């Protein structure tokens, strides 16, 4: 078995419908077949000579104001941990293409996601407003609409899909890029506005959208449909078994055949990647912004068979996951989790090769990051992989928490000839800095936001630092935190206990945040309380409020159940 399967390629003159039909008949995915040629989406690229990026002398910087407007590809994974990539210390999962991006650019050691779960983190990134000011501060399934967790009901009624929408009047940086002449696309998972709402991606700055509108549908990689802009495109995937189905009664959990029904015809990352190649090829002669938000490696655990077999051979046999912690069962959970990430890495390599074939690699900024830390359910095993890296890998300290493992994520930026290769930054930054950064890199004027551009840090110039960073997370028991230099203040269980108790950690000597030193530093605690108060504005959506008078009833809590 070859160690690194060939990168996916696109077929000449194939429409997506042809692609879906061919994939279904072959029973294989895009990456698995090698049937599509990358130069397909890019017919002018045949015979193109790859240019080597110019090397910067030590200490050199770049003035982007005099440069051609760069293309930007922003890749934000779903639930990828700080330690899930080889370039961040991962020992079990192979990510050679992403590692090459890091080797050719800058890797950040202290970049933080906007929030600890999907929807608010994505809203914060797009709007530049941190969680004390953002409209979306948690996952909100809008359960009052009906049975939003019923897949047959959602299939019949699109109104039951999706999450709380960003409201009309929201300004995202893709909107600003549109006005500056950029072609914009979002491919992957949205989760910021149900179908027909004001928060749909086409109304939030994207000329083109392809993927999942709804986070709940994204719990399966074999959905019955994806969205092409605002219309469903039905796939030859049956609804049954659903995203949280179990093994058949009496099925042998150690028999691979017991899991066959969970693999259907079209693996959603395949047509999504086809659209990515197509968008890039069609916009090779003008500046473009691609917001690639893959669902990988969010559970359920589902991956192309060739990659699963590769890791079964590498790891050996293992105990199956039978679905007792949600999502679909999986015969080889470790191998499948690794397979998902390596499959995505393979797609990243394919996209980079397309850029090189087109001769626009040097003109393209590529960002690779995650929306928050690794997960704790669905058969995932954060401690075994050490998905949070040097941070605490306890499942109670990752996704869904403001602990370091829940919000500190990998962040890689590549721009050949502009960013000094193979460099690391310890600059403290977060998701709400992205708007300011993108606008500076594209010479676009941002709207009011909470961020500070880290473009100077990328380009070797003097970088302005934040006074502090602030988060609030209203889901579950409720929490708030501040990062101020080496210090981190953290308040937990606000809904039950209020905000009287703040823990304090010195992250220079205690990077996992294990030793509470609040009692020794009352002056720092006092300052952090002032910082928290200055950063918080009561949310428009009352369920995001942590004030005692706004606490939900048990019935409301049940309706607001979130898993995304």
Image (cartoon, rainbow, N blue to C red):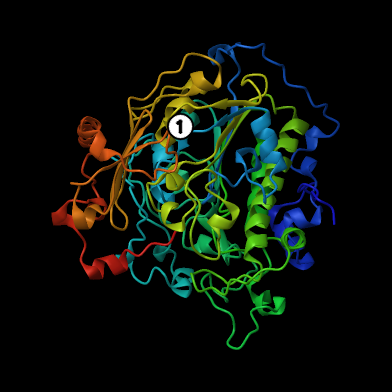
Q: Is residue 127 above or below residue 491?
A: above
Q: Residue 495: where, in percent of width, then height? A: 22, 56
Q: Residue 312: where, in percent of width, then height? A: 73, 63
Side of 528 where 168 appears, left or right: right
Q: Residue 521: where, in percent of width, then height? A: 25, 33
**Residue 284, visible in the rendered structure:** no
Q: Is residue 135 above or below residue 440?
A: below
Side of 95 where 45 appears, left or right: right
Q: Is residue 322 above or below residue 24?
A: below
Of 559 and 155, which appears nearest the observer? 559
- Residue 235 occupies quadrant: bottom right
Of 29 and 43, which appears nearest the observer? 29
| Residue designated by label 1 | 434
Residue farthest toward the bottom in the current orientation of the protein? 250
Residue farthest toward the front in the current orientation of the protein? 520
- Residue 366 occupies quadrant: top right
Residue sitting at x 60%, y 39%: 88
Classed neighbour count for the residue bearing mark 1: other residues with Cα under 10 Å, few (<14), some (14–19), many (≥20): many
Residue sitting at x 40%, y 63%: 159
**Residue 462, visible in the rendered structure:** yes
Residue sitting at x 46%, y 47%: 405
Quarter in which the C terminus is drawn: bottom left
Q: Is residue 413 above or below residue 247?
A: above
Q: Residue 212: where, in percent of width, then height? A: 52, 56
Quarter in which the N terminus is drawn: bottom right
For mark 1, give the secondary structure: helix
């Amino acid at each position: 078995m070859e160690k690194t399967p060939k990168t996916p390629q696109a077929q000449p003159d194939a429409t997506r419908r042809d692609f879906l039909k061919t994939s279904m008949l072959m029973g294989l995915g895009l990456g698995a077949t090698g049937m599509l040629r990358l130069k397909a989406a890019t017919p002018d690229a045949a015979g193109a000579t790859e240019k080597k990026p110019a090397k910067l002398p030590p200490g050199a910087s770049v003035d982007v104001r005099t440069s051609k407007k760069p293309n930007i590809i922003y890749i934000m994974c779903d639930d990828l941990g700080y330690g899930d990539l080889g370039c961040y210390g991962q020992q079990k999962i192979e990510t050679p293409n992403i590692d090459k991006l890091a080797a050719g650019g800058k890797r950040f050691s202290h970049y933080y996601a906007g929030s600890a779960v999907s929807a608010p983190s994505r809203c914060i990134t797009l709007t530049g407003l941190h969680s004390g000011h953002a409209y979306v501060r948690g996952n909100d399934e809008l359960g009052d609409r009906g049975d939003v967790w019923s897949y047959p009901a959602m299939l019949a009624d699109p109104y039951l899909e999706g999450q709380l929408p960003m409201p009309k009047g929201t300004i995202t940086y893709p909107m600003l890029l549109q006005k500056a002449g950029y072609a914009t696309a979002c491919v992957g998972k949205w989760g910021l506005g149900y179908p027909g709402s004001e928060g749909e991606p086409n109304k939030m700055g994207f000329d083109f959208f392809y993927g999942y509108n709804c986070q709940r549908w994204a719990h399966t990689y074999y959905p019955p449909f994806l969205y092409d802009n605002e219309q469903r495109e039905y796939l030859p995937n049956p609804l049954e078994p659903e995203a949280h189905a179990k093994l058949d009664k009496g099925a042998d959990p150690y028999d691979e055949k017991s899991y066959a029904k969970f693999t259907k015809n079209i693996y959603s990352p395949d047509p999504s990647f086809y659209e990515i190649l197509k968008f890039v090829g069609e916009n090779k002669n003008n500046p473009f912004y691609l917001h690639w938000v893959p669902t990988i490696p969010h559970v359920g655990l589902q991956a192309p068979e060739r990659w699963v077999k590769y890791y079964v051979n590498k790891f050996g046999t293992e105990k199956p996951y039978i679905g007792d912690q949600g999502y679909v069962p999986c015969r080889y959970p470790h191998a499948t989790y690794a397979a998902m990430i390596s499959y995505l890495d393979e797609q990243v390599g394919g996209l980079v090769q397309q850029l090189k074939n087109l001769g626009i690699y040097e003109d393209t900024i590529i960002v690779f990051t995650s929306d928050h830390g690794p997960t704790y359910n669905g058969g995932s095993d954060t401690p075994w992989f050490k998905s949070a890296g040097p941070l605490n890998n306890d499942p109670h300290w990752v996704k869904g928490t403001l602990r370091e493992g829940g919000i500190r994520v990998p962040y890689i930026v590549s721009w050949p000839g502009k960013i000094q290769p193979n460099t690391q930054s310890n600059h403290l930054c977060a998701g709400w800095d992205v708007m300011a950064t993108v606008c500076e890199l594209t010479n676009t004027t941002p709207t009011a936001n909470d961020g500070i551009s880290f473009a100077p840090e990328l380009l070797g110039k003097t970088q302005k630092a934040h006074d502090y960073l602030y988060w609030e997370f209203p889901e579950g028991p409720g929490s708030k935190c501040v990062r101020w230099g080496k210090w981190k203040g953290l308040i937990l269980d606000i809904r039950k206990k209020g905000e009287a108790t703040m823990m304090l950690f010195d992250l220079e000597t205690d990077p996992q945040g294990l030793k509470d030193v609040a009692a020794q530093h009352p002056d720092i605690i006092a300052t952090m309380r002032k910082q928290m108060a200055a950063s918080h504005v009561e949310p428009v959506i009352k369920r995001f409020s942590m004030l005692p008078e706004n606490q939900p009833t048990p019935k409301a809590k049940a309706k607001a159940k979130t898993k995304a």
